[in-house]
Amino acid sequence: MPALRPKPYRTFNRVILGFAGALLLVFVAFNTWINPLLVTPTPWTNEKFAEYRPIYRHQRTGKAGIVRSHPWEIAFFGSSRVDIAFDPLLPGWGGKPAVNLAVSAGTLPETANILRYTVEKCPIELAIVGIDLGDLSGPGSGWKTTGFMESPFNPKGEVVERELRYLGGVSTFETAVKTLMNWTERDKPGFKLPEYTPQGHRLRHQDKPDVRQIIHHDAIPHAMRGTMRRKHAIEESQWKIGFVQQILDDTKKHKVKLKIAIPPNHATYISVYRYLGDPDPGFSIDRKALARLVAKSNADHPDAPPAEIWDFNDYHPLNCEPIPPPKTRMHWWLDGTHARKALGDVMLARMMGWPLEGEPKDYGFQLTQDNVQQRLDGLQEAYERFQKEHADQFQWMVESINSYNASGRANEAEPEGAQEF
């Protein structure tokens, strides 16, 4: 009896499956060779691509990969204010490997879990955590739409599915292709490296050509909408308090020195809150909560390094840098809410006790539970001085407010969360 022949479609299916399997292997080999998001290291991964990986659109995943890539000892966490300003390659670190793990629009739910992921994988001895004013008194967070949920930072993520996607996923392949294109075009005139350094610092492509217009059109209206929202409901968010406590507990458990930084905003931005009658223009809810939680944590863990709070959000001369003429840049500021690396260097020097001269030498205020009221009273007095000593800037701010009100955009809804854009 002749052997039964397979039906013709079986051969066809095998060919198709074999082709698909071969294509998948090519994807995996290519993705792991370039390792564009640093989450699939292999013996054949080529680190010549380190400077050319464009992680900007996949920041959370990319920064989780950076955590995995090296035994870091110093790490920065927070929102874009930290992401842009804090440099992990400063000489002051003394050769210790430092990394910037802050993310755009990051709020406390993300910051706390990114820090936890880091301390469980790296022997860090110092964590500098930026907490934006308004985060603790704002119950919302955009963490479900930022890419956090799909990243390794999410403690409840589908691990197997996620890792398979990194190995053979189309988005990983596209990022790998872009990395390879960056590398091949590196010697062409006008080529620019991607935004992020291999240490996670968003150092490049941050300059904006007309800071005056950006503060007028974006920063001032943002503060206005924030004030409008805060007039309806403002209180300490117990959900966010839990994440601050998580940060304190994790750093104490792992004997990590914690320095909390309250990042600065430009004086014209913070003045909007007082001028428009915000119910808590000094963000006393946030400042008092941080001071209280840190004081209690330090008292409860006397054998662990004490945590500190450094408050840079005030009317110091560096925050009152004059608004420049049209189509020019500022020395200390990228816009009304994001300090340049130059100002970030000053903040880090102050927190670390490195020497400074001139105006920067007294930048920032070390906040404690004992002096928090003094700090709040001083901010009100500084606001009154700002009106007199920088009358031109104050008047420009008022004109920007009036212009925005007249535009009809003043009733636009402001998203919940920290004062971040």
Image (tube, rainbow, N blue to C red):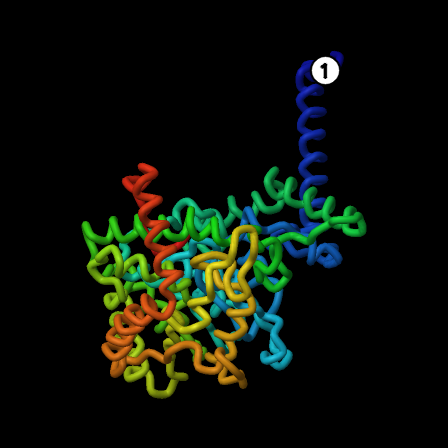
Image position, residue 83 (x, y; %) = 51, 61
Left or right: 270 in relation to 10: left
Image position, residue 295 (x, y; %) = 28, 80
Q: Nearer the viewer, residue 89 or 392?
A: 392
Residue drawn 30% across the image and 52% down it: 226
Q: Quadrant of the N terminus?
A: top right
Image position, residue 293 (x, y; %) = 28, 74
Image position, residue 53 (x, y; %) = 66, 52
Q: Is residue 253 visible?
A: no
Q: Nearer the viewer, residue 129 or 30?
A: 129
Left or right: 21 in relation to 201: right
Badge 1 is on which residue? 5
Left or right: 401 in relation to 330: left
Residue drawn 46% across the image and 66% down it: 321
In the displayed structure, would residue 47 be above or below residue 124?
above
Q: Is residue 266 visible?
A: yes
Residue drawn 53% across the image and 68% down it: 86
